[in-house]
Amino acid sequence: MFDSLSDRLTGVFDRLRGRGALGEQDVRDAMREVRIALLEADVALPVARSFIDAVTEKAVGHSVLKSVTPGQQVVKIVNDELIAMLGGEDAAPLDLDAKPPVVIMMVGLQGSGKTTTTAKLARMIREKHGKKALMASLDVNRPAAQEQLKVLGEQVDVSTLPIITGQQPVDIAKRAMESARLQAADVLLLDTAGRLHVDEALMAEMKAVASISKPHEVLLVVDSLTGQDAVNVAQNFSEEIDLTGVILTRMDGDARGGAALSMRAVTGKPIKFAGTGEKLDALEAFHPSRVANRILGMGDVVSLVERAAQVVEKEDADRMAERMMKGQFDMNDLRTQLRQMQNMGGLGMLAGMLPGMKKAKAAMQQSGMDDNVLVRMDAIIGSMTAKERANPALLNAKRKRRVAAGSGTQVQDINRLLKMHQEMGKAMKQIKKMGGLKGLGALFGKGGLDAAMPGLGGGKGGLPGMGGGQIPADLQNLLKKK
């Protein structure tokens, strides 16, 4: 998400940082480029204008232009203003602090992903908040809408209100309220009907349902891919009904990001969640500060750690740590690592969330690499016998030909994977020599990330072999093959 905007802004600020001194005209020229980038990203014109005015006013100040690192100071000002535009430092949480059943009313146009998002939110309420939820579909217009929610409810293990053919939305809402009380549900999610556009019938129906159910949260679901139109829809809804927040769907496919950047400023309502994929666990809390960091190429390590905590099994992590302490690392361990990378979103996603890895990600794309490389490496390891995975030294020429044939690859690919495994094994031994994980942690504590790995945290040294964003030759050759 935000790829095109991030690339444009990164280029502008790289040029600013490359200059030892900045004049007022330099800042104004850079802000003109930023303004164009925002408008091309489909940010609403008033929002872009207000943002640029605020940044320019602060950036042309004496303390910035005369500072030791004026380029960095300007980037910090832009980052702070981005966070403010997106809604402030902290994520706006889902408010469930009310007498149960807490009613959450989902509204939006048809096709915005409202029904799927309702199921995703119900799953999150059950798993992360530990509360009992009930879902009810009030959509009697769209064919099979109620059946769709029922199927999704079974998939996320959340109860849905039984369907009564011919019942109207207000009557369904009344029955849902009563059912939620009888079942002692903590939260009731009402999936209201949508229309192809905002009209009087849609608004009248929503207001009637709201008057009956007295919702504690009214969440507007909008498709971020519709760009400026999503902002217009949000503005229309906010004028007609008392919204408490916005959920942006298909954020993973929105390279521009204009809807997210404009939404808070236009509606005055916080973006609470972002849909990041089709899977029913692909709903994330929207953190303005983290999003701003990713837009400016600063990475999002906190989200990466959270995603890892969800994906990586504790038993696997403990086992891996124990083997690392012993200096052991076989093909089974490598396969576990590869699968965890796949589950976390692949190479591109990981590179985009690590600070200083923007150029490395670009180098991957230019080299013709893609996330299918993880699948191919997994296929190679899967074609080995259990003994070969435990002891890769057994792989002689004959065995390599068999593995290549079984995985649909070539012997050269097997050799590259083995070399990669050897290099990772050496790294594990180095960690052991440094005193294991505790020793490594102590090293990170002295001077932080730059001291431990110059360049990864923003220094000039760079990772060995990365060469300002270049992928190491061996890994590049391994990943290049389609």
Image (cartoon, rainbow, N blue to C red):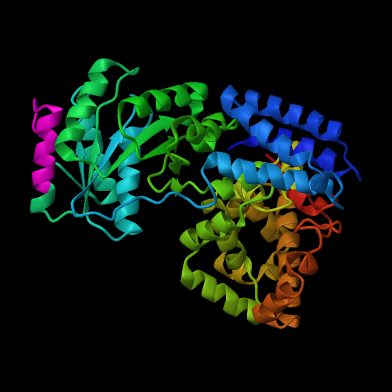
Residue 272 in view (yes/no): yes
Q: How many marks?
A: 0
Give residue 28's quadrant in the image. top right
Q: Which sits in the foreground, 98 or 311? A: 98
Q: Which sits in the foreground, 98 or 394? A: 98
Question: Residue at the spot x=61%, y=52% of the render?
Answer: 300
Q: Position of residue 104 (x, y in %)?
A: 26, 43
Question: Residue at the spot x=69%, y=27% of the render?
Answer: 35
Q: Position of residue 161 (x, y in %)?
A: 14, 42
Helix, strand or loop for the magenta stretch, by majority:
helix
Give residue 480's quadrant in the image. top right
In what quadrant of the picture does the C terminus appear? top right
Q: Which sits in the foreground, 349 or 391? A: 349
In-image side of 229 versus 62 (left or right): left
410 in the magenta segment: no
In-image side of 177 versus 301 (left or right): left
Q: Which sits in the foreground, 373 or 28? A: 28
Q: Which residues are magenta?
A: 163-179
Residue 163 in view (yes/no): no
Question: Residue at the spot x=66%, y=45% of the render?
Answer: 79
177 in the magenta segment: yes
Vertical order, 341 against 277 (above or below): below
Q: Position of residue 18 (x, y in %)?
A: 88, 43
Give residue 366's quadrant in the image. top right
Residue closest to the far right: 20
Question: Residue at the spot x=48%, y=46% of the render?
Answer: 286
Residue closest to the far front: 62
In what quadrant of the picture does the N terminus appear? top right
Vertical order, 255 against 337 (above or below): above
Q: Position of residue 27 (x, y in %)?
A: 81, 35
In-image side of 432 versus 454 (left or right): left
